[in-house]
Amino acid sequence: MTVNVLFVCLGNICRSPTAHGIFEQKVKNAGLQDEIVIDSAGTGGWHIGKSPDARASQFALERGYDLSHLRARQTDPSDFLTYQYILAMDNANLADLKRMKPSSYKGHLGLFLDFGDNPQYREVPDPYYGGDDGFQLVLDLVESACDGLLLDIRHQL
Ligand code: 4NP
């Protein structure tokens, strides 16, 4: 039995693929790649089939995380059958997911940064329309929340 984790943002080209790629690397480093299944998706459908944003990919690569294998997809109601953790980057994503959630869902649906260590940030700010600093902030927030999430999951394995 695996623990299945889905990261969700709006477009699935900036924040959630960053979380996907970083968490994948951390899980691999911990030798838990057969225990933990990881995916990401966007609540919006504009970028289906696209690679991550070039800026997100470049800055992630500079920190040692390769996002080049990832392709955007949209969230689907069947995700609630597959993923025990569904983690939203911001409150708007979370609200959309709550509308989609079947009443029978027993997994963890919440904000990804609940696993982070920076109490100033409950949401991962959308970097899409901003400058490079926004992408670096996404990486900082996502790296620490991935560490917290891995600790949480380890307690269940
Ligand atoms: P993401 O960023 O949700 O972190 O992938 C965005 C990407 C694209 C758009 C919005 C946010 N967009 O409006 O196209």
Image (cartoon, grey):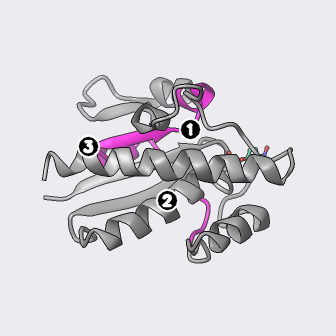
Position in image of residue 77 (x %, y %): 43, 40
Q: Do the residues labelled 3 and 1 touch (CB within 8 Å)?
A: no
At label 1, which amino acid type do we have? Met
| Residue 110 figure quarter | top left
- Disc 1 C-beta below 8 A from ligand 1: yes
Point 71% across, 66% down: residue: 59
The residue identified by callout 3 is 152
Point 43% across, 60% down: residue: 23
| Residue 20: assigned label | 2
Position in image of residue 83 (x %, y %): 32, 47
Point 47% across, 47% down: residue: 144
Q: Are marks 2 and 3 in contact (CB under 8 Å)?
A: no
Separation of residues labelled 2 and 3 (CA atoms)? 17 Å
Quadrant (top left/top right/bottom left/bottom right) for the N terminus: bottom left
Position in image of residue 111 (x %, y %): 47, 31
Reply above or below: 64 against 135.
below
| Residue 89: assigned label | 1
For label 2, the crowd category at 10 Å Cα-Cα, with few meaning under 14, some 14 to 19 and many 20 or more, is: many
Q: Which residues lie in the magenta part?
A: 70-94
